[in-house]
Amino acid sequence: MSAVLQRQSALEQAYSRLKSTPLMSPNHEWLACMTASWCVGQSVLPDYMGLEPDQFQTLKDHYFQDNCLTERAPSGNQIDFDRMLEKEDLVNLLKRYSRANTLEMDWIIGIIVAGCLGNDHLWQDLGLWSRPQLTALLRYNFPQLAAKNTKDMKWKKFLYKQLCEEEGLYLCRSPSCNVCIDYQKCYGPEE
């Protein structure tokens, strides 16, 4: 069996195991996808999936109590949050637009912020399986924020653009996105 098929099989097995508990909210599906990907080393999420150790333990107890999840990232990824100067700003942005103030929302926010340190598309860095999954997650959890992405900008770029606009910073070289030479980098396909 090829390495790609082995990874896919491991991912599907991890996902099936994690989905064995009853669906508690729409976030359970996305958390199961991200956790399954993380378990087989297919995300950039670091130890504890980017959460604080106590948050990770509560997530396990709440959704995945019958599954043996290690705290260490199988991918070996270590994210240095000290170099992420905008971590608090990202957390605050997402909290401000969140549809609820719950433990589950704190997990979603923590995981998204950790994924923002990756170098790929946000959905890939989080271990989601498609961009539409990320779009659905953001629309469900942050409906007003997601509604601002009227031109389908790539989500990581969109989040950082929101931070810049809140600070009154406009770093683009063009007066509008439609005439920018980097348009495809922000709005092109994410295959």
Image (tube, grey):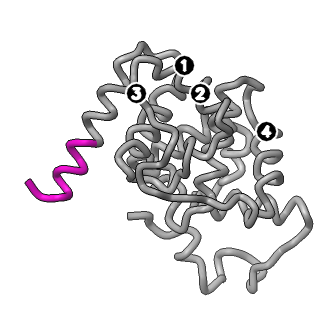
Query: Whole-percent x and y of residue 128?
Result: 44, 46
Name the residue beneath numbered marker 4.
95
Q: Are marks 2 and 3 in contact (CB under 8 Å)?
A: no
Q: Could you say which disc has been placed on residue 57 in the image?
A: 2
Element on which disc 2 rests: helix
Residue drawn at (58%, 54%) of the image: 115
Q: Which residues are magenta?
A: 1-10
Amino acid type, label 4:
Lys
> What kind of secondary structure does the magenta stretch mostly adopt?
helix
Amino acid type, label 2:
Gln
- Whole-number angstrom distance, CA of label 1 to CA of label 2: 6 Å
Whether 9 is drawn above or below 151: the answer is above
Q: Are marks 1 and 2 in contact (CB under 8 Å)?
A: yes
Residue closest to the eye, 181 or 76: 76
Residue closest to the eye, 118 or 93: 118
- Whole-number angstrom distance, CA of label 4 to CA of label 1: 23 Å
Amino acid type, label 3:
Cys
N-term mark: 4 or 1: 1
